[in-house]
Image (tube, rainbow, N blue to C red):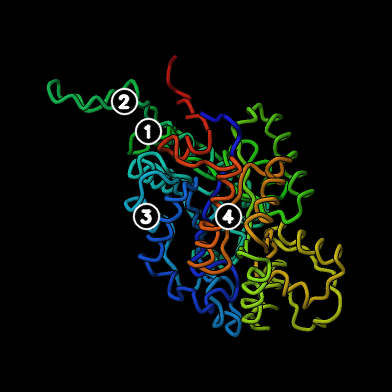
């Protein structure tokens, strides 16, 4: 078997695609957010192409209250399925592909999360992953009786303890704790039961979890924050990190930094994988790819563009800004920090006007955009992979489903031909696809 290092691929299933105007594309499934057959077919095609995982993002509120912009968008979580419900249903439609869903540590309790993802791991035969998010979106607070959205530091402090509790709960039972011996009448072995008895600053959780240890030992822990606090949390607990860099040098620096933090935490290099988002327009020729890009850009409404930029910059007011002038000073907010800084740096580095900046992000919203042929796109992916800027890529199609099928039909075969991506699954669990070890139970003897 070829033991050469190969890249990992994730399918980021944004309902109508990641582009702000994706839903308006003639080939887009405009009702994708609540169309289960749409997701079922995407999942089937991703699995047939041997992707490592499907990924579903989440928000516990519609993002924003600018109704002029909202009424023109499908990307602000206006009308779509709750991801854990959806991905559980998709687990029944698939056999091998990994299933990762986002869930917030700010507006959930750890017992809920531990239980639901352990259930998904059982139901799917070991394919579950939890993307730990801290809710950067302050509108979520309004749906949970909170008068204010906790600060960035408060959210990460809670997230740190939250993840300890979840992982502790996942170790509630040893692997062979349930003899279910009909003859003797013994259902479980009390010696293999370990209630957590957690007493912390944010949580008091007795445990145990009322579901056995799951097929992967624990669902794969995924994290996507890139601030200092986000990286620290990832280094001590995440097994997969989703990055959002759009420049290879930044991606390499991010990759090196996370690896260094991992070592500081006493963790092995291979216990963490990093996948960077890629926003591709693939064509059989450059002209075809450019045409696909231009067709979507023409559909961006200016109201949507400015509103999107404001949201990405932490909710700052851009209403009085000259669109054809440079980006003014943007003050810090309690929203996500890394994305805001990425955009400010891009505007300064490339001397972009506000209009140019919003046009730039309207598509991929600052993610790494690639427009080209199978050869040119694979060249870029290969370079990032070989130069250790990423262990793999999260594919974020601009429009869906056609944009995703372009990637599957044009890019994946070329990656396989180059030996950069698998031509078949070797295992059945998400851990096996990612090359991650099954964690041992902290309480088990020997
Ligand atoms: C690929 C990717 C997926 C993400 N998914 C979600 C999500 O589903 N919901 C969410 O609220 N935030 C999501 N985020 C945002 C991050 O979880 C995080 O809140 C953000 O990067 C700000 O954190 P930071 O200040 O540590 O960078 C995602 C980020 C990336 C790069």
Front disc: 4 or 2: 4
Front disc: 4 or 1: 4
Left or right of 305 in this view: 41: left
Question: Which is more N-terminal, label 2 or label 4?
Answer: 2
> Residues at badges 2 and 1 in contact (C-beta under 8 Å)?
yes
Give the number of the disc on residue 90: 3
Picture coordinates of residue 60, whole percent (x, y): 50, 63
Q: Quadrant of residue 362?
A: bottom right
SS state under label 3: helix
Instruction: Write the residue at 56% across / 63% down.
Output: 397
Could you say which is closer to the camera, residue 371 or residue 229?
371
SS state under label 2: loop
Above or below for 229 versus 315: above
Above or below for 65 versus 103: below
Q: From mark 2 to mark 1, how far is it between C-alphas? A: 9 Å
Judged from the image, the quadrant occupied by ligand 1 is bottom right
Q: From mark 4 to mark 3, how far is it between C-alphas? A: 24 Å
Give the number of the disc on residue 228: none
Instruction: Write the residue at 76% across / 54% down.
Output: 247
Question: Which is more N-terminal, label 1 or label 4?
Answer: 1
Question: Which image quarter is the C terminus in?
Answer: top left
Question: Which is more N-terminal, label 3 or label 1?
Answer: 3
Question: Which is more N-terminal, label 3 or label 4?
Answer: 3
Give the number of the disc on residue 411: 4
Give the number of the disc on residue 177: 2
Question: Which is more N-terminal, label 2 or label 3?
Answer: 3
Q: From mark 4 to mark 2, how far is it between C-alphas? A: 46 Å
Q: Point out the residue furthest to the left here.
A: 183
Instruction: Write the residue at 62% across / 72% down.
Output: 292
Q: Quadrant of residue 200?
A: top right
């Amino acid at each position: 078997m070829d033991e050469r290092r190969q890249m990992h691929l994730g399918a980021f299933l944004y309902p109508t695609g990641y582009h702000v105007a994706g839903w308006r594309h003639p080939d887009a499934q405009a009702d994708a957010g609540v169309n289960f057959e749409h997701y079922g077919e995407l999942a089937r095609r991703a699995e047939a192409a041997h992707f490592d995982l499907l990924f579903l993002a989440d928000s516990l509120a519609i993002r924003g209250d600018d109704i002029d912009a909202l009424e023109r968008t499908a990307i602000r979580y206006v009308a779509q399925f709750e991801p854990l419900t959806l991905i559980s249903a998709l687990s029944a439609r698939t056999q091998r592909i990994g299933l990762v869903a986002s869930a917030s540590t700010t507006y959930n309790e750890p017992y809920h999360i531990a239980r639901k993802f352990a259930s998904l791991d059982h139901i799917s035969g070991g394919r579950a992953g939890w993307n730990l998010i801290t809710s950067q979106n302050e509108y979520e607070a309004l749906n949970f009786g909170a008068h204010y959205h906790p600060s960035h530091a408060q959210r990460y402090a809670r997230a740190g303890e939250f993840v300890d509790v979840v992982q502790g709960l996942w170790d509630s039972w040893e692997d062979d704790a349930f003899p279910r011996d009909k003859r003797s009448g013994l259902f479980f072995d009390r010696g293999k039961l370990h209630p957590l008895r957690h007493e912390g600053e944010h949580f008091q959780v007795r445990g145990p979890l009322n579901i056995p240890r799951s097929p992967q030992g624990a669902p794969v822990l995924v994290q996507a924050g890139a601030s200092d606090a986000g990286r620290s949390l990832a280094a001590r607990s995440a097994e997969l990190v989703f990055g959002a860099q759009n420049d290879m040098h930044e991606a390499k620096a991010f990759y090196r930094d996370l690896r260094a933090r991992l070592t500081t935490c006493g963790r092995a290099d291979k216990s963490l994988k990093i996948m960077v988002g890629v926003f591709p327009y693939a064509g059989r020729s450059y002209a075809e790819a450019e045409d696909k890009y231009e067709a979507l850009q023409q559909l961006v409404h200016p109201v949507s563009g400015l509103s999107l930029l404001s949201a990405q910059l932490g909710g700052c007011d851009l209403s009085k800004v000259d669109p054809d002038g440079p980006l003014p000073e943007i003050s810090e907010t309690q929203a996500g920090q890394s994305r805001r800084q990425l955009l400010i740096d891009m505007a300064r580095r490339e001397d972009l006007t506000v209009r140019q900046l919003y046009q730039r992000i309207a598509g991929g919203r600052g993610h790494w955009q690639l427009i080209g042929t199978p050869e040119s796109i694979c060249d870029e992916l290969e370079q990032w992979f070989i130069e250790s800027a990423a262990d793999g890529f999260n594919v974020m199609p601009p429009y869906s489903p056609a944009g995703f099928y372009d990637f599957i039909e044009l890019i994946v075969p070329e990656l396989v031909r180059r030996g950069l991506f698998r031509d078949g699954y070797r295992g059945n669990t998400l851990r096996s696809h990612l090359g991650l070890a099954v964690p041992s139970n902290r309480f088990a003897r020997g």
